[in-house]
Structure formats: C-alpha cells, structure tokens
Amino acid sequence: MTRIATLPKAELHLHVEGTLEPELAFALAARNGVDLGFADVDALRAGYEFDDLQSFLDLYYACMTVLRERRDFAELATAYLERAHVDGVQHAELFFDPQVHAANGVAIDDVIDGLLDALRDAAGRFGMSGGLILCFVRDQSVDSAAATLEAVAHRAGDLLGVGLDSAEVGYPPALFAGVFARAAELGLHRVAHAGEEGPPAYVVEALDALGAERIDHGIRSIEDPALLARLAASGVPLTVCPLSNVRLRAAPTIGEHPLRRLLAAGVQVTINSDDPAYFGGYVADNYRAVADAFALDDDELARLAAASVRASFAAPERKRELLDAVQAWRAAR
Ligand code: HPA
Ligand code: ZN
C-alpha cells in the first residue's frame, strides 16, 4: 500500500479549486469576510453528497468565493502540492477557472501569480515540476472565453495550456473551436473535458474541432469501438479520475468502472484525482482504489505511472528522468 505513495507519478487532471478543504475554506472565508452559508466545517463536509456533475459544481463554485487574493491562491496550491508530494507526485499540471474568479472580483494576474508562487516553492522544496492549464468554463459564453484568452495572451509563457471544463451536456466542444485555434497560435497545449457525462461524440469533437492533445475523463469512449480504436492508434491519453466518476455517478461503482476495458483496448490511461477535497481521495487513493478493484500488480501500476509521465507536458529530459524513476521503483521489490 505504501508502495503506491512512493511510485513516481504525474498528476494531469487536477482542478486546484477542487483541492480546497473545508478547513481552509473557513479560514479564508473569515480572513476575507465572506459568508460561506454553512455553520461549520462539518456542515460543509456533510454537503459533499452529489447526484451528478451539476450538483457538485453548484457547491464547488460557492466555495470558490472565499478565494480573493494572490496569497489565497498560493496557500491553496501549496496545500495541494504538499499533499501531492506525499503521494509521490513529481510533476503536477494544475487546472484553474479564471472566469469564475473574475466574476468574484479577482484579477486574473493575482490568480496566476499566486499559483505560480506555489509551484516555484514546490520546485525548490520538493524538486517538483509542473505548470498551469487555464480552463474555459463551457457554460459561459464563447465570447467570454475568447476575452479571457486575450487578457492573458501577453503572459502565455506562464501557462502550459488551455482546457475546457464545467457543465458538459449541451455545451459541445466545437463551440470553442475558434478559441482553441487562437490558443494554439499562442503556443499553448490544448486539453478538454469530454465524455464524462457527455456522449462519445463530444470526445471525437474535442479531437477534431479543438485539436485536444489529451481528453479529460473520456470514459464514455468505451461506448464507441471506432473511437476506442482511434484513441489507441493515435496514443491520445485519457486523464481518468475513478473516485470522481463514482462520486458524480459517471460510473456506478469502482468495480464497474471502464478502466480495465480502456486499458485492454490499448488506450493510454492515466490516473488522477480531479477534485480531491470533494471526492474522498487524493491521487494515491485513486491508484489504490483501482489497484484493489482490478487486482493491479506492480507492473500495471508502473505502466499507469509511466503513462502519466509520457502524457504530461513536461520537457523531454524531465520525462526521461521521471520514467527512469518509475523503472527504479519497479526494480526495487
Ligand atoms: N468536470 C467538469 N468540470 C469540472 C470538474 C469535472 O469533473 N471538476 C471541476 N470542474
Ligand atoms: Zn475535471
């Protein structure tokens, strides 16, 4: 069990706002004079019962109102990176939702600078690498996404890439084709949530219309054999989040999760935590859950970790270093 925490890994599907633990939410609410609308930490935690993606998003966006200043974002990300370090994460790519923070009156530069402060600190303390992926919330307008991208264009060098998240069904990826084309022009990587609640056709659209280099979730690809074959042949990875999928009822149980079948189809699968403060586990808990449910052995676990490194946007020499570390873990029995 502890071996999973020492397995060197990359985390690629992690919403930094989804790492906001109730204790920190209350501390920031008090410091910033925000009323969270819950009596205490226990009352808030008791609200973590979700029927679907939207029921989660409602609470998630409410809690985000406590984040106001650059130091809030630095403290949030530092708490996550410390926790991730304990779980063997050596490279972390953090999603963030600037449009939601802007609506809360926060300057986008404060969000980016606070998160970069934390990444720099983790690089110094733990030797961790990583970066930021700016996500457009698909239930806001395309114009808003385009304006957000232009607002950060001058600091594209501070970002790894762009993504697409929030409510999926009814917001097909192709809506954002122009915004993603502009992101590509700016030299940014492109990823997108698709096939979490939405149909496999949304995964196809994310590939064709957005040029997505990774698909976040993508689990409903299991319903489309041609898409599975395409994912396997192209090597486009899925960033799968098993505990999230069960909590948001995208999979009935861990045992019925399509992970094993995706692997058997030859798809590059990575394991991630999505919103660990809300879904009952950080990344090592997600590895443990699937290791138990599918009796994964060390070879299979090492393959998942190696896939996470290869699927990352780390520099080639960093990938080599981390792949060597995975091999060393595998060799040490
Ligand atoms: N799906 C879509 N949007 C999100 C998620 C998710 O799982 N988590 C945070 N924003
Ligand atoms: Zn997500």
Image (spheres, grey):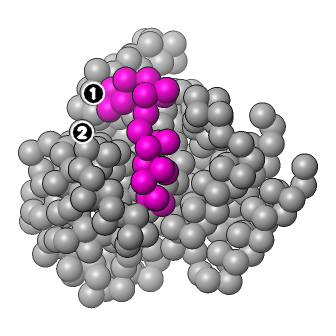
> Where, quadrant-wise, is the N terminus in this rendering?
top right
- Magenta span covers which residues? 246-268
Q: Is residue 149 above or below residue 293?
A: below
Q: Secondary structure at mark 1?
A: loop
Query: Does the magenta-highlighted stretch encompass residue 265?
Result: yes
Q: Which residue shows up at 81% across the image and 56% down it?
A: 330
Q: Are marks 1 and 2 in contact (CB under 8 Å)?
A: yes
Answer whether residue 66 is visible to the viewer in this image: no
> Residue 112, how many percent across, how many down?
44, 65
Q: Would you say 246 lies left or right of 61 here?
A: right
Label whose residue precedes the other's in the sequence (1 or 2): 1
Q: Which residue shows up at 54% across the image and 48% down it?
A: 271
> Residue 285, how many percent across, how many down?
63, 35
Q: Name the residue carrying label 1.
A: 52
In the rendering, which numbered label is found on residue 197?
A: 2
Q: To which quarter of the image does residue 325 belong? A: bottom right
Q: In front here: 308 or 60?
A: 308
Q: Amino acid at mark 2?
A: Glu
